[in-house]
Image (cartoon, rainbow, N blue to C red):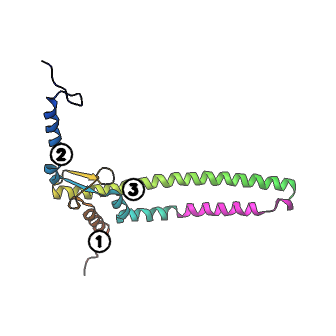
Amino acid sequence: MQRRATRTGRPASVRPLLALLWLCFCAMPLWAADGLAFVRMQRLLDEAPQMQQARERIEQEFAEPRSELTQLEANIAALKERDPALLSAAESAALKRRIEASERKLARDREGLRSRLAARQNQLVDGVERVIGEVLGDLARERGVDVVLSADDVVLYGNPRLDLTDEVLTRLRRAAEPPAAPNR
């Protein structure tokens, strides 16, 4: 006995199985929604007070090295403004070598600063992400949520009642507030 094939080339007996699998897949959100939530991670990183504190800390830590680079750039510009026609050949060659050496130093210093800045930013962002993860984990446990997705990466549509972003931000803001002074 030969099995009848469908248009897709699959045997007809596979069709009910595929329909059952499709039905289960489509119905999955109906029973899984209670344990599912999402956050807008980029918004948390943009608006978390801990992230703003990290940005301010970076600005403070790197203000002096940036100022030194600006000063070196100004020194190079001043050297370039000197008129070589007023200098002897030896002085002109020495000025050219000094400008080139200063430009190489500026490039090295700029790259070193960029590297240190990136490492420090990564370190601070990792700390903020860890705090966000702790707050999110606590909130998810309190709400009985089994899975929290990042709406930035995966979720094409999410019911606003499943969005924990505002509540996470509220808790992050509360955690960032300085402790109240004791009343006397």
Image point 20% across, 56% down: which residue?
140
Disc 1 residue type?
Pro
**Taking 95 as reference, is 136 left or right?**
left
Disc 3 residue type?
Val
Which element carries disc 2, helix, strand or loop?
Answer: helix
**Residue 83 in the image: above or below residue 5:** below
Which percent across, then down, holds residue 172? 29, 64
Classify residue 168 by image quadrant: bottom left
Location of mark 2 (residue): 26
Main secondary structure found in the magenta portion: helix
Q: Which residues are magenta?
A: 63-86
Disc 2 residue type?
Cys
> How many residues crowd mark 3 within 10 Å: few (<14), some (14–19), many (20+)?
some
Of the image marks 1 and 2, the number of the one nearer the N terminus: 2
Location of mark 3 (residue): 125
The label on residue 179 is 1
Question: How far, Cα to Cα, is label 1 from label 2?
Answer: 48 Å
Classify residue 87 by image quadrant: bottom right
Say if the magenta span includes residue 180.
Answer: no
Image point 15% across, 22% down: which residue?
3
Image point 70% across, 62% down: which residue?
77
Mark toward the viewer: 3 or 2: 2
Image point 74% across, 54% down: which residue?
98
Question: How far, Cα to Cα, is label 3 from label 2?
Answer: 38 Å
Q: Quadrant of the C terminus?
A: bottom left
